Every structure is written in structure tokens, then in C-alpha cells.
């Protein structure tokens, strides 16, 4: 299944990476998209192509409430993409410049990430009141991430998503001394999963506080893992003193590459002093996932038959079923029906 799901919000970049007055050209789901931040701090997104001569608008600049093209100075409003000024025009020209428009994308900055809504069809129009909510992390309010990192994965989004949710690859891929050392010790895992709106979640359960890092959160620590289409994975650890969250999303660049965005949140007040170390460890951990899918591409070029087994690969199966149901519901113009039932999964890792 190689479809890229539209009519969803995708992360374009962490908010900290976009300065006031800055323009960034992105490719998202194969579309050229301009993301910018105005002088008032508001973010916006539009098609990164000037309709006049086709030059990317990210080579231009922000002027007030508009973006100016570097080629001829044409100016486009950041709210709706309509042309507001053409410097070369005189009073003798009869052109109605308001009819010239660059496609504008809904854009939001939420909990420190910049999201862009990618519609299936611009011709249908976009009703802001009917847009789905931007994904948020429950229990963290307006908190900003303490660490936000983005890595490029040279693979289709499906391989990145199922690689990140794969519960059995850890002992073989994540072998850093600070994460796992010594001989591999396997034991049976047994977890209850249940369906949610457009995905599934690991039902929260109490963790045995055997690892020292978890003890920072206090006692009675529980973990909850949530996955929702198109590619949003939220892992929340809650203790009786503090809580922490790893928030991971995957944004397709096109059919052959994607970006993985990971944000870390916590409520431990003194953890800030360890940010440089934690950032390095986060990049190393994500890099291990990236490196293994790069190796995977060496085999995939031969288009081999692939297999998914129970129960270790059940989450991957659910992901494909969710994608298929979503595509069918869009084609048939009907509500989405979650095809997943509550189930206990068991695997060794």
C-alpha cells in the first residue's frame, strides 16, 4: 500500500526552527509548500510557486502581511494567498489582481510544532470550521517541547511508521550502552490494546520501577502509548510526582522519503540542565531507527514479498487496515469505521 493520506495535519517543522520574518520551502506529500512566520509571530503556509513565472516563493521575503516574489516583486497575502500588489502595473492596466491567487494551506503552531493541513482536493475548498483538530498531547496544556529533533528517512512513510512502532526490534537495533548492554535477555510481553477514534492505544498499565530513569517520575508509574492516523505516536509516562512524553510523527516528503519529528516533554523542573545530553541520546536513538531502514532499502529494491506475523507485527497489520479503511471511507463518502477490536498482544523481546 503506497498511498499518502491527505486531509490530515502533518508537522512541517518544530516551531523553534522558524524565526520571525523567515521563509522555508518544504516538500510535503509531493507538494511544494512555503512555511513562514510574519513579524507578528503568526505562522502561515502556501504553495511555494509564484503563478507568474514559476519561481519558488521561498527565495523572496515577507513584507507586512504578504510574501513578495524575488523575481518581479509580486506580493501575495499570507492569509488567503491572493495577489495584493504587482509593482510593474500602471493605471492603464485593467488586470484584476485579486483574481490571481496562490493556494493557501491551513497552518497552526501547537505545543511547539508547526502543523500544515494537506487537503485531498483544493477544488472542494477548505472550510476552516470543519477541519479536524490538530493533534495534541493530553495533560501538557500549552507546554513547549524541551527537545525537538527532525531526521530524514530515505524510505516510504509506511516503513518508517511500522519501524517506529515495532515492539520486537529493540534488542537488535537499539544496542547503545546507555540503553541496553550485555547479553540479550528476552521475556514475554503481554499488553492490552484497544481502538480509539482513528487508531489504537496501549491501555495504561503500571510499570515495575526497575530502571533508574523512570524513578525520576516518582512511584506508581504508568505508561500509555497512542497511535493515530496518519502517523502520530504519543508515549506518555506518568508518575505520582512528574510526567514525561515522547511525541513522534512522520511527514512524507514524497513516495520515497519522509521526515521523522520527535518532541520530548517533561514536567521535572530541574531536567533542563541535562538537555544537551538528552538531545544527543535522542538523535542517536532515532538515528539507529533511520540506519536500519536505510539498510532495508537495499533489499526492497528487488520488490520481495514481505510478511507480517502475529503477535509482534499485529500493530503493523492494524496500521495498514486503518489506512485502507480511511481510504475507502473517503472514496465512499461515509464515516470512518475503526476496524480494530480490543485485544491482548503477546511477544518476546
Image (cartoon, helix red, strand yellow):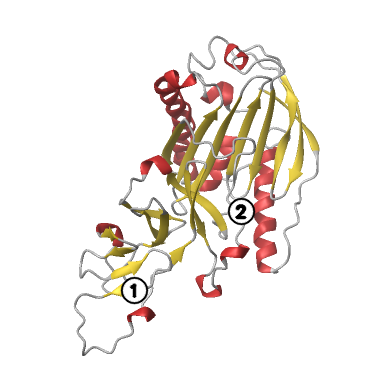
**Depth check, front residue: 205 or 240:** 240
Which residue is depicted at the point 55% across and 36% down?
247
On the picture, is 68 further left or further right than 159?
left
The image quadrant that residue 54 belongs to is bottom left
Where residue 304 sits in the image (x, y, percent)? 55, 45
The image quadrant that residue 240 belongs to is top right
**Depth check, front residue: 309 or 158:** 158
Where residue 337 sits in the image (x, y, percent)? 76, 56
Which residue is depicted at the point 56% across and 64% down?
128
> Under tag 2, what secondary structure?
loop
**Depth check, front residue: 326 or 278:** 278
- Tag 1 near tag 2, CB within 8 Å: no
Quarter of the picture holding the N terminus: bottom right
Which residue corresponds to mark 2? 133
Where residue 102 sits in the image (x, y, percent)? 38, 70
Which residue is depicted at the point 43% across and 58% down?
30
Quarter of the picture holding the C terminus: top right
From this viewpoint, is residue 115 visible?
Answer: yes
On the picture, is 152 further left or further right than 61?
right
In this view, the residue farthest toward the front is 40
Q: Which mark is residue 83?
A: 1
For residue 31, above or below residue 166: below
From this viewpoint, is residue 308 visible?
Answer: no
For residue 193, above or below residue 109: above
For residue 242, above or below residue 256: above
Of callouts 1 and 2, the N-terminal one: 1
Q: Which mark is residue 154?
A: none
> Under tag 1, what secondary structure?
strand
Amino acid at each position: 500500500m503506497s498511498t499518502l493520506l491527505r486531509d490530515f495535519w502533518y508537522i512541517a517543522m518544530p516551531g523553534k526552527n522558524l524565526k520571525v520574518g523567515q521563509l522555508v520551502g518544504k516538500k510535503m506529500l509531493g507538494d511544494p509548500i512555503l512555511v513562514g512566520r510574519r513579524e507578528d509571530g503568526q505562522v502561515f503556509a502556501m504553495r511555494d510557486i509564484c503563478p507568474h513565472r514559476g519561481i519558488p516563493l521561498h527565495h523572496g521575503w515577507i513584507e507586512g502581511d504578504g510574501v513578495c516574489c524575488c523575481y518581479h516583486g509580486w506580493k501575495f497575502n499570507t492569509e488567503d494567498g491572493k495577489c495584493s500588489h504587482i509593482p510593474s502595473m500602471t493605471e492603464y492596466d485593467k488586470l484584476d489582481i485579486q483574481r490571481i491567487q496562490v493556494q493557501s494551506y491551513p497552518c497552526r503552531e501547537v505545543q511547539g510544532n508547526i502543523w500544515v493541513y494537506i487537503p485531498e482536493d483544493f477544488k472542494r475548498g477548505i472550510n476552516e470550521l470543519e477541519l479536524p483538530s490538530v493533534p495534541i498531547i493530553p495533560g501538557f496544556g500549552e507546554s513547549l517541547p524541551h527537545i525537538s529533533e527532525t531526521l530524514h528517512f530515505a524510505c516510504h512513510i509506511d516503513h518508517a511508521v511500522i519501524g517506529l512502532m515495532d515492539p520486537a526490534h529493540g534488542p537488535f537495533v537499539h544496542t547503545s550502552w546507555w540503553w541496553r548492554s550485555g547479553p540479550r535477555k528476552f521475556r514475554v510481553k503481554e499488553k492490552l490494546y484497544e481502538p480509539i477514534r482513528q487508531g489504537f492505544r496501549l491501555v495504561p498499565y503500571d510499570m515495575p520501577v526497575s530502571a533508574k530513569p523512570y524513578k525520576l517520575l516518582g512511584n506508581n508509574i504508568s505508561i500509555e502509548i497512542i497511535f493515530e492516523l496518519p502517523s502520530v505516536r504519543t508515549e506518555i509516562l506518568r508518575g505520582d510526582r512528574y510526567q514525561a512524553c515522547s511525541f513522534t510523527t512522520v511527514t512524507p516528503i514524497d513516495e520515497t522519503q519522509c521526515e521523522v519529528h520527535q518532541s520530548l516533554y517533561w514536567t521535572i523542573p530541574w531536567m533542563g540542565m541535562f538537555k544537551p545530553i538528552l538531545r544527543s541520546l535522542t538523535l542517536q536513538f532515532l538515528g539507529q531507527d533511520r540506519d536500519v531502514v536505510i539498510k532495508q532499502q537495499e533489499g526492497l529494491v528487488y520488490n520481495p514479498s514481505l510478511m507480517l506475523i502475529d503477535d509482534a507485527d499485529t500493530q503493523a497489520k492494524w496500521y495498514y487496515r486503518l489506512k485502507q479503511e480511511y481510504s475507502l471511507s473517503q472514496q465512499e463518502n461515509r464515516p470512518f469505521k475503526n476496524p480494530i477490536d480490543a485485544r491482548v498482544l503477546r511477544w518476546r523481546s
